[in-house]
Amino acid sequence: MVHVFKQTQFLPVDIKTAWDYFSTPENLNDITPPELRFQILTKLPPKAYPGLMIAYKVQVFKGVVVDWLTEITHVDEHHFFVDEQRKGPYRIWHHEHHFVEVAGGVEMTDIVHYMLPFGWFGNLFHGLIVKPKLDKIFIYRAGAIKILFGKDKYKLAK
């Protein structure tokens, strides 16, 4: 089963500022919850580009650290970029980052299509563990972005 997560957030900055921040791979550290013990293993370039592979270690549960490898598959400067998991805790992870200029700033939308491993058995854990954890990660991310960029409004799509 394919699950979809969507979050939209207003950034009170111009499109260049938003793009420059989010297309810089090392900035992911700033917006990732500390309890994930997120560690980038790859030497990173200053900007994301199609084909860029980024290796991480991430703690999915207390004491359980997994390797995660993502590839930046698409980049349309100032509009969107996509990262896809090549190795990691999900069967499929396809994360779109969209940026649209609006009055007073930028509307940023994250859309994640994901599938869990282990078929129907893995899906049993979606509502109990995976979805709440994903919500918590993106709520943290929205709060971190709010602090980084100032006044903000965000909403989680249900």
Image (tube, rainbow, N blue to C red):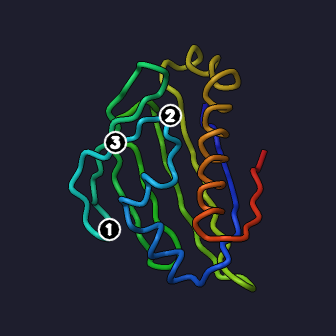
Query: Residue 108: x percent and y percent?
Result: 63, 67
Drawn side of residue 15 relative to residue 20, left or right = right
Q: Which residue lies under the disc numbered 2?
A: 35
Query: Residue 43: x percent and y percent?
Result: 21, 55
Q: Earlier in the sequence, mark 1 or mark 3?
A: 3
Q: Which residue lies under the disc numbered 1?
A: 49
**Circles 2, 3 touching at the beta carbon (< 8 Å):** no
Report, in whole angstroms, how far the alpha carbon at label 1 lies from the one at label 2.
28 Å
Q: Amino acid at mark 3?
A: Gln
Query: Residue 30: x percent and y percent?
Result: 47, 55
Image quadrant in which the N terminus is located: top right
Label 2 Cα neighbours within 10 Å, binned few <14 / some 14-19 / many ≥20: few
Drawn side of residue 52 relative to residue 116, left or right = left
Q: Earlier in the sequence, mark 1 or mark 2?
A: 2
Label 1 Cα neighbours within 10 Å, binned few <14 / some 14-19 / many ≥20: many
SS state under label 2: helix
Label 3 Cα neighbours within 10 Å, binned few <14 / some 14-19 / many ≥20: some
Q: Amino acid at mark 1?
A: Tyr
Report, in whole angstroms, how far the alpha carbon at label 1 lies from the one at label 3.
20 Å
Quadrant of the rendered image containing residue 110: bottom right
Q: Which mark is residue 39?
A: 3
Q: Which residue is most to the left? A: 43
Residue closer to the observer: 91 or 26 = 26
Report, in whole angstroms, how far the alpha carbon at label 2 lies from the one at label 3.
11 Å
Count the labels in the image: 3
Residue drawn at 62 percent across, 80 percent down = 13
Image quadrant in which the C terminus is located: top right
Position of residue 62 relative to residue 140, above or below, is above
Residue drawn at 47 percent across, 28 percent down = 60
